[in-house]
């Protein structure tokens, strides 16, 4: 691709502190503008005007598609200048008519920190040409990053370059060769480039003061023995990640000042025994990732100054291999599937060893006691990923300063009492990792002297951590300053107090995930209240994925946020927390809102993720009023008993249980006391809500059981109670009483007086009874006048004459008899005859009704005489399923000759249904029942039938006419009272030929 098709120049330039540093466009098409940068400062961007529209597409890390024209992006950010070739696909810059450097505008950068050329073709000119174009007089770091062409690196590129600190050539996939040198003007150079396919033997001849050389990511297999001959000042040589198979002593013979040698990640299988003998100042040697089978015994015999050795191998180690190295401080020995034994004198006379990484030896089952004879200063010991089965009790007794011990990923079965108590290890050890072993038990006194231990990892074992004696403390109790305890993935079933409470640490993290814990003991929640440990401030307990179903949670009241408030954070994710009221305290705590100025000492973290089983309901949003609480014993037969933790009350629900008397006893108890909110558990008894709604109870004779004295709410609605006596006498703490829809006619004075004397009763319901509004109701009327807030439905109470009681005055139902009694008696004697006549004429209708009902003097009476006060000829009762036939066909025909009443037209909205049914039936001469199977299923339909049937019995005359719509309903579906009526009375069949003639009987006896 020709460089002539470069379509855009974009320059991001922060102004230098020097005023003369400017960007100069080199032709008339150059366009520049200043934009705000995301970080501090601003950026100058320049491009060719012809392709200015492409600028809006350029973003950080943006690379345009292949079909977009290539362009350069130049950016100066603080003291770093970058030239990026975007969308360049050149194989080699020789295909262009001009060189890459000719495309870069002339600048005055002067003194900068870094200069980068990125994603560009490798130049054919020396780098000095680029420095002249940019007028760079001083730069510390020069980089060629990801070039799009290959090159054979030679000394040609480095001729005449200005003083540099670093040069970096980076190739594709981040593989590289790095060169760092120090010359009279700078400190070092780095070259990184995978596309370097060869190194000339004399490539470094101009870099005589080179101090650091890194060759990384080549496919190089050999190095010329003379390549480093002039690098007498070299201190760091890194030949990393190549394909080198062999190295000779001659290659390093002149590197007398070398401090670090890294030959890792090559294919070297054998090292000459004298290869390091000239490197008398060597301090750091790394040779991992090769194919070594063994190392020469005297490999380090001449490197007494060496401090750090990193080796990996697949073979044995010779005796005394790393001995007699007085400056040795760090050793990394990794990986050997063959090594099964360590020479006991491996580190003898190397007294300054501080860090030892001896890991990856899967066949190494034993550590010799004498191995650490002279290694008293080891502070970090990593023995992980070996095959250790057991440890001798005196394995670590020679080590005086061991602070970090890693024994993870071994095959350890148990830990004995004295393993950490011999020598000074007990006083110095701070971090201990025993994870991923096969530990089943730990002796009680294993950690007895580890007073300095700060972190302990026992995860991924088979531990139960059960002491030999049933104490509330575990084997970890002596470790008083533990901050991190990881016990995850074990078989622990109990939480011990010493894991939670400590007076010597401010923060602790306890990981108990994936164990077999089923409960959380009280001391976990009480720990924040313990003033004995003022230093303990914060603990985080992760109990995820255990077997906790019920949490006996004790909440502490929120406090004002304080700097030193103690907190305990608990994570319960993944536990089978039960969806029942035994967890009510926990659920209530999670849902309870907290004001910003409050501080909870207990926090359930990740509560949004917490669900309860088996419903998988999010606890954060579940309705606590619907928590299943069936943990009640002693429930009466045919009743359902539940517990309400919100009200601390047992609910005995006997609705529609066909009861004729109240339950004989209420000896009810809670099976699971955990369902009771913690602050109420000291309370001896729970109150009872007794629901006896819709039964056939006639009298209230409670059992002598003491539990009836605990009833606070009693619902006797829809029963057949005629006498209220003894109800309140046997219920001393009664608060709510519902006697609506019974057969009460009056209330006794004793009952009303008990209500007056009770300080508990707050709600009474009496609607729907057949109240006789005479002097007997005066006490009730007066009680409501004095306590209007107690009788909740007083305004709905009707008298037997269907009038609302509250609309009457006392004189209406109980006139005063003062002073006139004598005169009335005398007047009655004088005007008795007149009064009898008057009463006959005034009340002749009532008299006729009474006589007719009792079949007395029927020769003087007809049915029309007793129905003169009726408002309607007929009341039509039907089911809504039969609406079309009844309302569209039957009623229009009846309306032609009769005054008909039906729900849709004559019922008044807002009034009680039962009240209107009884009123309309009473006001109608006949009640027409449109009988279908749907009608028999209708509660209100049957209620209308029974009301009319009762009225007919009371009046002792025909009041009910049956019309069969369709087929006669099955006998099994017909209630007994309806079946008896059908069997003793004639009915009319809808659609019959003489149907309308039969209907004329509506107005006749």
Image: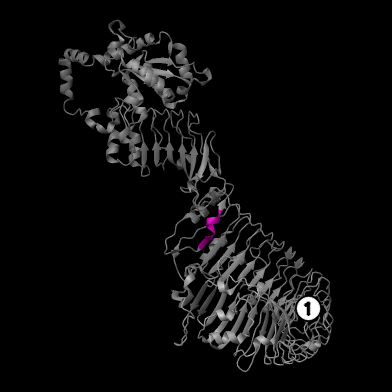
Residue 607 is inside the magenta segment: yes
Quadrant assignment for the C terminus: top left
- Residue 143 in the magenta stretch? The answer is no
The percent coordinates of residue 297 (x first, y second) are: 84, 84
Instruction: Left or right? Give the position of 397 relative to 595.
Output: right
Percent x, y for residue 131? 57, 86
The picture quadrant where one finds residue 459 is: bottom right
In-image side of 871 versus 332 (left or right): left
In front of the other: 521 or 909: 909
**Position of 510 relative to 166 (above/below):** above
Residue range highlighted in magenta: 602-610
Farthest residue in the front direction? 97
The mark tally for this picture is: 1
User: Residue extending furthest bottom?
Assistant: 184
Residue furthest to the top in view is 859
Can residue 505 be seen at all in this image of the molecule? Answer: no
Q: Is residue 19 left or right of residue 208?
A: left
Q: From this viewpoint, is residue 775 visible?
A: yes
Image height of 10 relative to 890, above or below: below
Q: Residue at x 67, y 84 (%)?
A: 179
Near-viewer residue (536 or 813): 536
Q: Nearer the viewer, residue 654 or 147?
A: 147
Residue 781 in which image quadrant: top left
Q: Could you tell me residue 63's position as x and y percent?
A: 56, 68
Can you give x and y, in whole percent of width and height, for residue 80 in the image? 54, 81
User: What residue lies at 43% left-to-right and 40% top-to-bottom?
Assistant: 713
Disc 1: which residue: 221
Quarter residue 91 falls in: bottom right
């Amino acid at each position: 691709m020709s460089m002539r098709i470069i379509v855009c120049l974009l320059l991001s330039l922060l102004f230098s502190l020097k005023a003369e540093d400017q960007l100069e466009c080199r032709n008339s098409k150059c366009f520049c503008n200043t934009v705000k940068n995301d970080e501090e400062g601003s950026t100058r961007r320049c491009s060719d005007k012809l392709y200015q529209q492409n600028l809006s597409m350029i973003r950080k890390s943006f690379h345009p598609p292949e079909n977009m024209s290539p362009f350069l992006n130049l950016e100066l950010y603080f003291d770093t200048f970058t030239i990026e070739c975007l969308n360049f696909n050149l194989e080699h810059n020789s295909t262009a008519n001009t060189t890459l450097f000719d495309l870069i505008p002339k600048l005055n950068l002067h003194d900068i920190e870094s200069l980068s050329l990125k994603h560009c073709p490798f130049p054919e000119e020396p780098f000095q040409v680029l420095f002249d174009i940019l007028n760079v007089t001083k730069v510390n770091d020069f980089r060629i990053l990801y070039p799009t062409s290959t090159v054979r690196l030679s000394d040609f590129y480095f001729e005449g370059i200005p003083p540099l600190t670093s040069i970096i050539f980076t190739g594709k996939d981040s593989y590289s060769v790095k060169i760092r040198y120090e010359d009279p003007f700078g400190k070092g150079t780095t070259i990184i480039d995978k596309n370097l396919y060869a190194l000339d033997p004399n490539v470094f001849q101009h870099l005589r003061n080179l101090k650091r050389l890194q060759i990384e990511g080549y496919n190089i297999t050999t190095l010329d023995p003379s390549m480093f001959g002039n690098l007498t000042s070299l201190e760091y040589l890194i030949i990393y990640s190549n394909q080198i198979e062999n190295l000779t002593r001659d290659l390093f013979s002149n590197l007398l000042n070398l401090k670090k040698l890294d030959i890792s990640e090559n294919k070297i299988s054998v090292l000459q025994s004298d290869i390091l003998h000239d490197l008398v100042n060597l301090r750091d040697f790394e040779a991992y990732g090769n194919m070594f089978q063994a190392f020469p015994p005297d490999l380090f015999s001449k490197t007494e100054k060496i401090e750090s050795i990193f080796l990996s191998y697949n073979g044995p180690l010779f005796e005394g291999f790393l001995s007699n190295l007085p400056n040795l401080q760090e050793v990394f020995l990794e990986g050997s599937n063959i090594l099964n034994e360590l020479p006991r004198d491996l580190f003898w006379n190397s007294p300054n060893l501080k860090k030892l990484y001896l890991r990856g030896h899967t066949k190494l089952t034993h550590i010799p006691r004498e191995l650490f004879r002279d290694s008293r200063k080891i502070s970090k010991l990593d023995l992980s990923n070996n095959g250790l089965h057991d440890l001798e009790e005196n394995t670590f007794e020679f080590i005086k300063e061991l602070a970090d011990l890693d024994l993870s990923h071994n095959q350890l079965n148990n830990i004995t009492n004295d393993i950490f108590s011999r020598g000074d290890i007990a006083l110095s050890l701070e971090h201990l990792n025993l994870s991923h072993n096969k530990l089943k038990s730990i002796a009680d006194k294993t950690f007895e002297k580890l007073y300095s231990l700060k972190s302990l990892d026992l995860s991924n074992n088979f531990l139960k951590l059960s002491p030999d004696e049933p104490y509330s403390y575990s084997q970890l109790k002596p470790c008083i300053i533990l901050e991190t305890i990881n016990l995850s993935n074990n078989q622990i079933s109990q939480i011990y107090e010493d894991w939670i409470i400590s007076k010597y640490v401010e923060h602790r993290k306890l990981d108990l995930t994936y164990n077999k814990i089923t409960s959380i003991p009280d001391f976990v929640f009480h720990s924040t209240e313990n003033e004995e440990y003022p230093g303990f401030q914060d603990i985080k307990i992760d109990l995820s994925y255990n077997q906790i179903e019920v949490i006996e949670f004790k909440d502490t009241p929120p406090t004002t946020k304080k700097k030193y408030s103690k907190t305990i954070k608990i994570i319960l994710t993944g536990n089978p927390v039960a969806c029942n009221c035994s967890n009510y305290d926990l659920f209530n705590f999670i849902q309870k809102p907290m004001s910003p100025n409050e501080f909870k000492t207990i926090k359930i973290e990740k509560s949004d993720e917490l669900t309860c089983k088996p419903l998988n309901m999010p606890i954060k949003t579940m309705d606590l009023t619907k928590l299943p609480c069936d943990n009640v014993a002693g429930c009466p037969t045919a009743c359902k008993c539940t517990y309400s933790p919100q009200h601390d009350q047992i609910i005995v629900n006997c609705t529609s249980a066909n009861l004729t008397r109240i339950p004989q006893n209420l000896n009810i108890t809670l099976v699971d006391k955990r369902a009771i909110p913690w602050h109420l558990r000291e309370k001896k008894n729970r109150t009872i809500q007794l629901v006896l709604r819709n039964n056939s109870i006639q009298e209230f004779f409670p059992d002598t059981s003491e539990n009836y004295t605990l009833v606070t709410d009693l619902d006797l609605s829809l029963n057949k109670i005629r006498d209220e006596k003894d109800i309140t006498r046997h219920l001393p703490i009664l608060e709510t009483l519902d006697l609506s829809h019974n057969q009460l006619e009056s209330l006794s004075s004793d009952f009303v007086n008990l209500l007056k004397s009770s300080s508990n009763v707050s709600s009474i319901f009496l609607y729907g009874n057949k109240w006789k509004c005479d002097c007997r109701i005066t006490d009730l009327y007066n009680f409501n006048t004095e306590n209007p807030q107690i009788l909740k439905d007083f305004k709905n109470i009707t008298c037997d004459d269907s009038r609302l009681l509250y609309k009457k005055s006392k004189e209406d139902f109980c006139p005063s008899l003062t002073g006139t009694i004598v005169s009335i008696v005398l007047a009655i004697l004088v005007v008795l005859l007149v009064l009898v006549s008057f009463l006959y004429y005034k009340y002749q209708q009532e008299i006729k009704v009474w006589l007719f009902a009792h079949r007395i003097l029927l020769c003087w009476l007809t049915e029309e005489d007793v129905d003169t006060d009726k408002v309607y000829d007929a009341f039509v009762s039907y089911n809504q399923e039969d609406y079309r036939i009844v309302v569209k066909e039957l009623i229009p025909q009846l309306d032609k000759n009769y005054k008909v009443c039906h729900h849709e037209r004559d019922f008044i909205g807002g009034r009680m249904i039962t009240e209107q049914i009884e009123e309309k039936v009473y006001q109608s001469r006949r009640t027409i029942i449109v009988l279908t199977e749907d009608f028999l299923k209708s509660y209100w339909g049957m209620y209308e039938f029974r009301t009319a049937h009762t009225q007919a019995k009371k009046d002792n005359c025909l009041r009910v006419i049956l019309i069969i719509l369709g087929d006669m309903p099955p006998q099994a579906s017909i209630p007994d009272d309806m079946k008896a009526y059908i069997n003793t009375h004639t009915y009319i069949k809808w659609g019959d030929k003489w149907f309308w003639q039969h209907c004329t009987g509506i107005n006749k006896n």
